[in-house]
Amino acid sequence: MVSLVSASLLIGVVSTAGADELSVIDNPYQVVPDGPALLDLSPEAVATRRRAPAGPAAIAFGDLDKYARDSEPEVDPAELAKRPGLPPGWVQIGDEVVPEAVAAGAQVRARTLPNSLRADGGDAPQGALADEICAFPDKVPPGVYVGDWTPGAEYPRRGTIYLNFVGATLYNGNGENSAEDYSLLAITGHKYPSFGGGEDKAIAVAQAVQADFDDWAIRTVYLERPHKTIPYVMTMVGGSYKDTVSGPAGGVAPSADCEDFGLRNVCYSFTNQQGVTTQSNIIGQEIGHTYGLGHTYGKDRIMAYGYATNGAQDMIFGDDCADIYVAANQGGACSGVNKCHCGIGEQQDDKATISAIYAPPGPDIVEPTIEITTPADDETFESGVGIAVNVDVWDDFGGYGWKMMVYEGDELLGEKYDYSRIREFGINGLPDGTYEVVVEIEDQADHIVQDRITIHIGDAVETAGGETTGGETTGGTDSSGGDSTGADSGSSDAGTSGPGMDDEEGCSCRSAGPPAAPGALALGLLMFASTRRRRT
């Protein structure tokens, strides 16, 4: 499992020369790959994973009425006092949880990545993106809109909001990863409760949230959880702050993710009995924080600071430069981004900021592509060696993801998600035999495309030069997590694809967003997946 947050948030803080200027901090949500995504298929590792107990299953969305409640259960104060606080290096300011350095006034910038990790291969000069999307490109400081994203995180993106009304068992200590239920604000092993307002209200809330994001290619789903492959922000709807490590608030979110490098954040809306509009306002604000938006002034703004949470007004994302709310001795965490759109760091244009990241609405008819570049199809390896699997990936919009699966015949031995987007997998521990390696890419429009090869372990073949063909992993540690051996819990994609497929995969019904009227279930999208075989 890759940690999406620096072990020490103060590492990378750089003081500026001017006495009146703020220090800066590298974006703590930015993924910096440190090695291939390793899948260990040794008998010992497989047995260990299969013995691991699964967490309590979430309830079905259609059962929400059974868990409706008029009030939240009381928590013993002594028990509450035993619960852990925020992770070291983080503090809470209102409904935002930010690095201590940001609370002390530091600004946030992106880290410069090696050209080999960049989606553009390093062809675009640093800062080139600012010239395209900034109203005031000359105001943008170094490290803002530099265009050095990794594949899958390119701008513009398409995105997904998953409103989790059914609860989940969450975990702390490994950064932010919505697919694997990791959250900075979670109590490890605690079963976060389901929504208490019933099914009809949940559907109405989802409709209202989707309406707030209709200006972008951002869909809201809630009936079924998205596949782990694609990045999505997850909002836990229901419960209370007592179900997290945070303090009292109407909702809470990890914040200061300028330019939305995190992609897989988890935020919370402690709403159950409030009105639909109030709930959608709070949810929208917490999601906005995960996109890097801070608080502003303005009674009609979703991102407004201190609006009445029991009010009935349907708030909006602002489409002009509004003054940001800054607490005493606190800098504007995303002031560099604000300078891009407003010319000064003390104002924020909500819509311009989101529009720099996410594409306008519209159909996505272009399938992503994925190709195994190494090893070659039908390649043979010596017994006991590690195997490096490298892939090329592409889509016309950011927001896609990919994984690797290993089959023996029709049996799925294991799968691995490349959460760190390094485009390199490692396979260790395969016994002698013949296997099929399948890589799969998915985009935010439910297009699924595969590439596959056959490999052989044992009975190594000598080349004409007398050397033995073989392979080895490129070192490093397991930096992406999400491996499975058929006993994976949560939203595993196991079984959605595999050997024997030719041109189509069939279908898997998914939640596609709120229906036209409350009380009716949302229709699912039908996913058609094409399987591409390597030409040899």
Image (cartoon, helix red, strand yellow):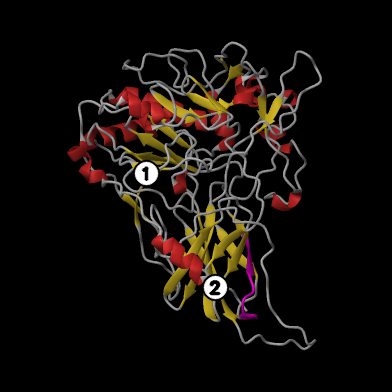
Q: How many marks?
A: 2
Instruction: Identify the residue at horizontal 51%, vertical 27% (top origin).
Output: 97
Looking at numbered disc 1 in the image, what kind of residue is underneath it? Thr
On the image, the x and y values in percent for residue 155 come to: 61, 41
Residue, disc 1: 169
Q: Main secondary structure of the magenta part?
A: strand
Which of these two is toward me, 2 or 261?
2
Please state if 350 lies on the left or on the right of 390 as rendered: left
On the image, the x and y values in percent for residue 67 come to: 21, 37
Where, by quadrant of the figure, is residue 211 drawn?
A: top left
Q: Which mark is residue 533?
A: 2
Please state if 222 lies on the left or on the right of 500 as rendered: left
Looking at numbered disc 2 in the image, what kind of residue is underneath it? Arg
Q: Residues within 10 Å of mark 2 (few under 14, many from 20)?
A: some
The answer, for residue 270, to whether it is visible in the render is: no
Q: CA distance from mark 1 to mark 2?
A: 38 Å
Residue 383: in magenta span: yes
On the image, the x and y values in percent for residue 248 come to: 40, 21
Given the current orientation, which residue lies at the most extreme left position? 66
Magenta segment boundaries in residue numbering: 379-392
Where, by quadrant of the figure, is residue 340 drawn?
A: top right
